[in-house]
Image: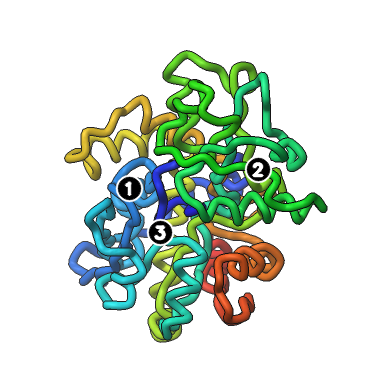
Amino acid sequence: MTPFFDVSRRSFLAGGTALLGATALPRLGAAQDLVPLTTALGWIPNAEYAGLWMALENGYFADEGIEGRYTPGGPNAPGVLVQLAADQCNFAGGDWIPFLEARARGNDFIVLGCNYPTSPSAIMSLSGNPVLKPEDIIGKRILSQMPADANTLNFVLEKAGLEQNQFELVPTGFSPEPLLAGDGDAYMAYATNQPITFEQMGLTEGEDFHVTLFSDLGYTVPGAPLVARRSFVEENRDLVVRYLRALTRGWVQNGKDPAEGAKLAVEKYGADFGLDLAQQTRQSELGQPLVTAPGGPGPFWFDVALVESSVAPVAAAAGIEAPVVASEIVDLGPLEEALASL
């Protein structure tokens, strides 16, 4: 599965908001030159990036002496890690497997945090035949957009001590409606996307259908790693801390009212894409609980131990031969400093 930035379009908690709340940092003088920093987005400018829009709109990057820039993604856009390798951006969102593949090709990239410490990857099912625990996967016809989803399902089964490959993948598109039509028993989804389609049809989660996060099934891979060149981070550490502080403030602010970031996506940053305000608002609402890990100090922070316990097995199943060692590919130091300063 490919959560968030590099995504198939299957696309903070109150404690985090309290910790990082409305910290007003002094704005730098308007005459001071701003350092341009570019973030490559894996998809069109929509509510997935609500925190970025809030950081831009509220001047949080300018507060840090940064001119926040971004390159939009989409079907015809170059891959975010391709842009990073070509020095067309400073930061890129992505997924673990493309990140590890890029490293295997000689790119010295590192992960600075994860936009979804709790991945939005989920499985949707109807109440008459729900998937709520690993055992429920057995014997199911599972609607999927990607053959690689079998790796995720097998990971869940193996971790639960169950025999693998006890399901059937049924090719489908990016709408969950075939689930209602009976084409399958469950649907590989993003908790921030496809459930909205059912809600707009008048169905109620928990009554008519269920959305079970894969993290609740044992697939605890944090989603949407934020990636940069190691050399850039080492040479510009203070600047990276300031970037992360501004971006974090944007997500905290959006967490106070998810409708704000959605409105910015619809009316300004994604105005050319015909986005629906109600859908985008709901997407922003559904994403907020996933932006900060339970018990975590703030957005982007994740348990580094998950890299070797969860990411490594998934990488091996995907054919990544190089060892996945957390200390070599993750640096949460700048994020730790940014969160502590708030």
The disc label shown at residue 53, or none? 1
Q: Nearer the viewer, residue 12 or 314?
A: 314
Judged from the image, the secondary structure of the residue bearing numbered disc 1 is helix
- In the rendered structure, the answer to whether residue 328 lies left or right of residue 276 reads right
Quarter holding residue 89: bottom left
Judged from the image, the secondary structure of the residue bearing numbered disc 2 is loop
The disc label shown at residue 194, or none? none
Residue 272, horizontal then vertical, whole percent: 17, 40
The residue mark sitting in front, 1 or 2, is 2
The residue mark sitting in front, 1 or 3, is 1
Cα distance in 3D space between marks 2 and 3 = 44 Å
- In the rendered structure, the answer to whether residue 30 lies left or right of residue 245 reads left
Cα distance in 3D space between marks 1 and 2 = 41 Å
**Residue drawn at (60%, 17%) of the image:** 208
The amino acid beneath tag 3 is Ala
The amino acid beneath tag 2 is Phe
First-in-chain label (2 vs 3):
2
Residue 104 visible in image: yes
The amino acid beneath tag 1 is Trp
Residue 257, horizontal then vertical, whole percent: 45, 34
Q: Nearer the viewer, residue 117 or 256?
A: 117
The disc label shown at residue 246, or none? 3
